[in-house]
Amino acid sequence: MEQPNKQCIKEEEKEIDLSDLVCKLMKGIEGFCDNYGKELQGENRREAYLKDAGEILELQFSEEVEMYVPTSWCRFPFYESDFGWEKPMWVSIAPIPTGRSGTPLGVTTFLDARDGQGIEAWVSLAPEDISLFETNPDLLGVDFVNPTPLYTE
């Protein structure tokens, strides 16, 4: 395996290769352990956590950051739940959270299909990213079956 590049990412480079990414991650983890890890073990650990949590939330909803959040609800027995109205015919997710500007955050949620034979992917993107997603060559080969949720076996 190639060793990470010592200077990490050069400013003139537009793309990050794998070894540069590994280098950057290693430096970040080292810096985290040296600085933040010690703060969390000190007497003011609560204040340190709240300060950083606030900064993360501020950054998350800023216009300068594109955030993509993958999550999986696979293997949760949603279709086995019965709250007195019988088992559900179809399970979906709650509305997608939006950033400050009202545009959807990049959230992808995976759920098992009702029949257990596939996975539903709920993808939320900003309008300008949708055409890129729909024309992505890696995704064009994927089966996009969108059956009605009301089908029964």
Image (cartoon, helix red, strand yellow):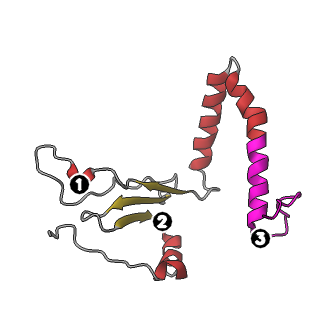
Residue 20 spot, x, y in % from top left: 79, 61
Query: What is the crowding at mark 3: few (fewer than 14 residues within 10 Å), some, or many (at least 20)?
Result: few
Residue bearing the label numbered 2: 125
Residue bearing the label numbered 3: 14
User: Which of the 4 quarters of the picture holds residue 65?
Assistant: bottom right
Residue bearing the label numbered 1: 79
Assign a secondary structure to mark 3: loop
Q: Earlier in the sequence, mark 3 or mark 1?
A: 3
Q: Is residue 107 left or right of residue 79?
A: right
The residue that appears at 49% across and 77% down in the rendered structure is 139
Disc 1 versus disc 2: distance between alpha carbons?
27 Å
Residue 18: which numbered mark, if any?
A: none
Q: Is residue 134 left or right of residue 63?
A: left
Residue 132 spot, x, y in % from top left: 53, 77
Q: Earlier in the sequence, mark 1 or mark 2?
A: 1
Seen in the picture, residue 57 relative to 77 is either above or below; the reply is above
Assign a secondary structure to mark 2: loop
Q: Earlier in the sequence, mark 2 or mark 3?
A: 3
Question: Which contiguous range is marked in magenta?
Answer: 1-30
The residue that appears at 72% across and 33% down in the rendered structure is 36
The residue that appears at 65% across and 35% down in the rendered structure is 52
Which residue is nearer to you in this view: 130 or 89? 89
Query: What is the crowding at mark 2: few (fewer than 14 residues within 10 Å), some, or many (at least 20)?
Result: some
